[in-house]
Amino acid sequence: MPAPLDHDFGGRVDQVVDRAVEEERIVGAVILVARRGEILYSRATGLADRESKKPMAADAIFRLASVTKPVVATAALALVEAGVIGLDDPTTKFIPEFQPKLADGSEPVITLRQLLTHTAGLSYGFREAADGPYHRAGISDGLDQPGLSMAENLSRIASVPLSYVPGTGWGYSVAMDVLGEAMARATGATLPELVDRLVVQPLGMDDAAFVVRDRSRLVTPYADGPGKAIAMGEQHRVPFGDGAISFSPGRVFDPASFASGGTGMNGTAGDVLKLLEALRSRGGSVIRPETAAAMTTDAIAGLETTMPGWGWGLGFGVLRDPLAASTPQAAGTWRWGGVYGHSWFVDPTLDLTVVTLTNTAISGMTGAFPDALRDAIYGRQA
């Protein structure tokens, strides 16, 4: 019976990856598997750009989408440790004009903790139908509308009624964008400056940034298509759940685009691994062990998420019930991904960290490919 990380796991992973690339469901990927910080599997496969037949490289730079969230969450918790912000501070302490209301017109307090845990009553446009309130208000999820300012997007977010009373529910949302702005206002620095100083530089995440420092290494983005992945256009919508995700890959090159704390960063698989390993080893050089422990523990006990078996920590999903989640991962595993085609997880019972960055939305993030990759690592039979 195969076991997690047995001597055959790399061969099983190769089979999953080779099949996905051959079938053109995934154009290219970089995959890292580490145990106790030692890299046991490292592979760059497929193409960084299919049209020019440019091969994927280990140091390829990806638009990270929601892989941004744990980076910004770590920076936020470093500011909490420094006493600059408090998790129970009201958001209006830093952004006085951000005053979204409930459907009945009342204006509840939204705390920074609620932003961090997605319990603030906010939403994402991609979680709504095409005529939903976020679409009618023109709210950006942080992946589209190049040149849109933070001030304008905050105004649009605040114009839409909250989905529920803050603290009483969970909904994946633009909350990290709001949190990022609160962090910037609290310090007088920009969010990119804060993230660079508090997380990126201390961990040596050389290519992690809200800008692309070496465009020659930036992968070309692709999207799910009929039969095989297709090249992403400058304005591209990919169906997802009940709605669709709106992408503008060129957003990253427009300096007027707001720095999205939820989706705005770029970086390599190695950059992501450095962050996750720092958190797995209880904070590394960026946050205290007790802060890292709180970050990686379910922080919303008693609230249900839209993901069976999963709760939420201070920045990403935390596994409550492996059976309900239909996963071989152990309870306490933490994970998330990014809609440009990424998935990652840390199973602390095995001291296991896995990073998979692809250039294919959405197949690289959720569904058959990341599930098969995970099962191959654990030796789970299909």
Image (spheres, grey):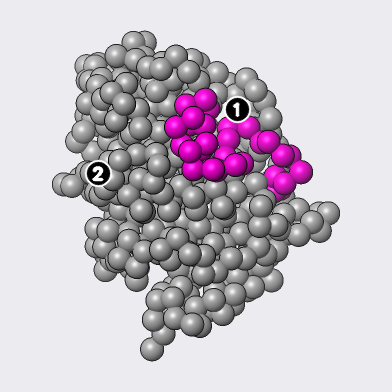
Q: Is residue 276 visible?
A: yes
Q: Which mark is residue 290?
A: 2
Q: Position of residue 109 (x, y in %)?
A: 23, 20
Q: Is residue 210 magenta?
A: yes
Q: Is residue 131 magenta?
A: no
Q: Which mark is residue 33?
A: none
Location of residue 104 by image quarter: top left
Q: Considering the numbered disc 2 on the image, is that residue within a helix, a strand or a loop? A: helix
Say which residue appears at 40% left-offset and 33% top-offset. Answer: 75
Q: Which mark is residue 145?
A: 1
Question: In the image, which residues are magenta?
Answer: 192-220
Looking at the rendering, in which quadrant would you find the N terminus? bottom left
Determine whether, in the image, residue 336 is placed left or right of residue 320: right
Tell me which label, 2 or 1, sits earlier in the chain: 1
How crowded pointer 1 is (Cα within 10 Å; few <14, some 14-19, many 20+) is rated as: many
Viewer-nearest of labels 2 and 1? Answer: 2
Q: Is residue 237 visible?
A: no
Q: Considering the numbered disc 1 on the image, is that residue within a helix, a strand or a loop? A: loop
Q: Residue furthest bottom?
A: 1
Q: Residue furthest top?
A: 97
Location of residue 175 by image quarter: top left
Say which residue appears at 51% left-offset and 69% top-offset. Answer: 40
Above-or-below relation of 123 to 370: above
- The answer to which of 318 and 280 lies nearer the viewer is 280
Determine whether, in the image, residue 107 is placed left or right of residue 24: left
Say which residue appears at 52% left-offset and 65% top-offset. Answer: 39
Q: Position of residue 311 (x, y in %)?
A: 27, 50
Q: Residue furthest right?
A: 52
Determine whether, in the image, residue 230 is placed left or right of residue 367: right
In the rendered structure, which amino acid carries the disc numbered 2?
Glu
Looking at the rendering, in which quadrant would you find the C terminus? bottom left
Determine whether, in the image, residue 169 is placed left or right of residue 142: left
